[in-house]
Amino acid sequence: MSTNYPFSLRIFVADGDPDGLRIVERSNWVGKALMFPRTIFPAIKQRAEFSQTGVYLLLGPREDGDGEQLYIGEGDPVKPRLDSHHAAKDFWNRAVFFISTGSPLNKAHVQFLEARLISLANDAKRLTLENRNQPAESNLSEADRADMEVFLEHLLGMLPVLVTYQSNDVKT
């Protein structure tokens, strides 16, 4: 990735609960992240953002209690995939997904992002990865590939803030 640049995040606590739905926007970026605990998914899944194409991460404790595990996926749209994981994957207790606020992402874009995120997660070896396969990067035009690399760079810059923030870590 390229040089780090300063940026700001705007976190909107949509339901007034710091542990509930959080909508996160980054300065000078066309993306948006939605973070939420699994427990509220049924109540929020009708939001318009869930009907968009995006890439998502599911996080939760490992069965052995030693750290966390991660699942990375994509959806066109996101909601049916998250519905499926809500019914079939028990490990996750929180999710974050990324969509575009500019030109909409398409299936090829999110397949590319998913493949790159899985590859990066495998290389980093920080969390147990629940994904069984390494999907191939989708065939994108040179321009689309460049756009998705920038989208990915901004997403990755935000991710450490998003997945480590827990409101109960903040003491008042």
Image (cartoon, rainbow, N blue to C red):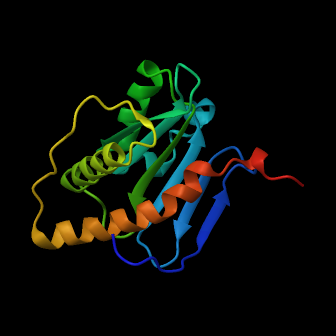
Q: Is residue 140 left or right of residue 30?
A: left
Inspect this view and state whether residue 17 appears. Answer: no
User: Which of the 4 image quarters holds residue 42?
Assistant: top right
For the C terminus, the quadrant is bottom right
Give the image location of residue 161, x and y in percent: 58, 58
On screen, 64 above or below 71?
above
Give the image location of residue 16, x and y in percent: 75, 51
The residue lying toward the viewer, choosing from 97 and 78, is: 97
Inspect this view and state whether residue 67 appears. Answer: yes
The residue lying toward the viewer, choosing from 54 and 70, is: 70
Q: Residue at x 27, y 47 (%)?
A: 119
Q: Residue at x 54, y 19 (%)?
A: 64
For the N terminus, the quadrant is bottom left
Q: Residue at x 86, y 52 (%)?
A: 171
User: Which of the 4 image quarters holds residue 85?
Assistant: top left
Give the image location of residue 82, x and y in percent: 42, 34
